[in-house]
Amino acid sequence: MALKTEELVLNMGPQHPSTHGVLRLEVQLEGELVTKVTPHLGYLHRCFEKHAEAMTYPQVIPYTDRMDYLASMYNNFGYVIGVEKMLGIQVPERVEYIRIIMGELQRIASHMVALGTYGLDIGAFTPFLYLFRDREKILTLFEITCGARLLYNYMWVGGLSHDLHPDFERLTREFISYFRPNIDELNNLLTYNKIFVERTANIGVLPKETAINYGITGPNLRASGLKYDLRRNDPYSIYDRFDFEIPVGEGLVGTVGDCWDRFYVRVLEMEQSLKIVEQALNQLPEGDINEALPKRVKPPKGSIYQRVENPKGELGYFIISDGTVNPFRVKVRAPSFVNLAILNELSKGHLVADIIAILGSLDIVLGEIDR
Amino acid sequence: MKTAKEILEILQKKFPEIEFSLVEDEPSDQIIFTDALKIHEICEFLRDGEGLKFDTLMNLSGVDDANGEKQTNDDGSETIVGGTLSVYYNLDSIELNHKTTLQVSTSRESPKVESVNLIWRAADWHEREAYDMLGIKFLNHPDLRRILMPYDWEEGSYPLRKDYKDPEFYQGMKVPY
């Protein structure tokens, strides 16, 4: 007698540790194999764009903090340089350098969470604790600078909220020399771990052309073998002054663009960010950080699309001004929002357990997906 | 590298029957304004055309232009009648390293824009968001559902419209609680 078979619908989330927040996945299964994944979003929708229309330009900055809450500094960064471009403000050199230092430290902190929780998803608990221990040190650096550990409101239109603490430079250099060897430790613990490689190599392979068509950006795109980084290809601020490599996926243990590549590109990027921070500290000029602060932020009529390389990909702000003190429209192109859309494409034909590996490797934050 | 003017000239040559115009506001990027119901073929040409090669859609935003006639209701709230909703497309060419912005407008009462989902898959969720927030219907979109708001949110209630009012009840619960 033939066995009766039918398609099974499995519900993952909204409360599921591997969905990194409140995300619901509706998974259709044919036995153990996935045929379709439908993400359901909106559990964290806080009407950022509607709020922004009721605020003045500087008042929007604290809201940007709360989108990608693991990379708040960089969310500030993108927004303020967009508004500065509309106003035609040139900020002092010192501000530019401090912004880069903060942005790159934030990139390291964000990647630490991405790598740590990815290990956790796969079943490796220890690297998570090691990485969070080191992340605390970065958060302490932020804390002595502006008083907040996660949501900073640090970068202002035309300047910064606080100048650096006298100890900041020494502590940051200490952190760099402390953290460099820890990357090797992470590689030994997790990256080349046999079980980890088995779980991630050749899983969720993302070809370059598909990635471009889906608008995938950031480490996920670079893992597919395309050397594309906005810090190089569409430079903003003063990134053209620094010497750094753009790591791309090479398929060292599997295929180019698999989960392992997406993981490893982030490991390599942390090293490059350390390099940028070091160079910026060496070149850091003296000066007044509040020199260019405008008395009134009131951009002329017009619109602008400003994009920056967030730790998770291309973060874009499309700002329309109608000539008043409130933005007419702020649309955020959140990298995770676009990156998550490929989940269905990547998961098809894989096992149920691989969905976790694929989702984790995309490194999403629900705060900016739902906004 | 092509400027908005050069791209405009190429488009005018290729599609003589479609109207194009250039929006120039300081300090913004220049925007090419065109027809909402021809956007699919224009975008297909922009993606594949020689010297254009816009291979990614960076961003797609729906905007309420709020340029209609404002009517004040009895309770003091405003309703906008007439006017337009717009969709902005920010395109990028990774291959040739240039960018451009397109804008299309559609009527507020029955907003219809052609979907570009088949050209750039990235448009899929962006279009769903524009539908969810502003009620713009994207023709030929395979799965036009709400995305951030609940699926059973009141029909015809779109939060990012400038004259949006909270519904009084949602599933029997009072909304402004």
Image: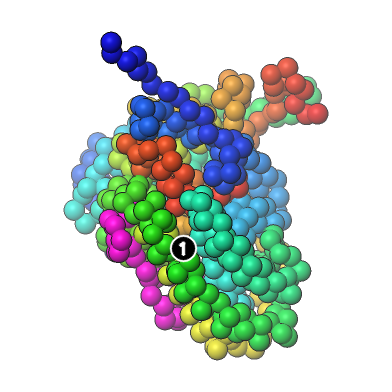
Q: Which residues are magenta?
A: A232-260
Which chain contains the residue that carries disc 1?
Answer: A
**Residue at 42%, 56% in the rendered image:** A196
Residue most toward the front? A1
Q: Position of residue A129 (x, y in %)?
A: 61, 62
Quarter of the image for the C terminus of chain B: give it.
top right
Residue most toward the left? B50
Q: Nearer the viewer, residue A73 or A289?
A: A73
Q: Nearer the viewer, residue B37 or B125?
A: B125
Q: Position of residue B162 (x, y in %)?
A: 63, 35
Mark 1 secondary-structure assignment: helix
> What amino acid is found at the position of numbered circle 1 in the picture?
Leu
A127 displayed left or right of B75: left
Q: Nearer the viewer, residue A18 or A219?
A: A18
From the image, tell me which residue sits under label 1: A190
**Residue at 58%, 65% in the rendered image:** A131
A266 displayed left or right of A261: right
Please determine whether, in this image, residue A18 is positioned above or below residue A125. above
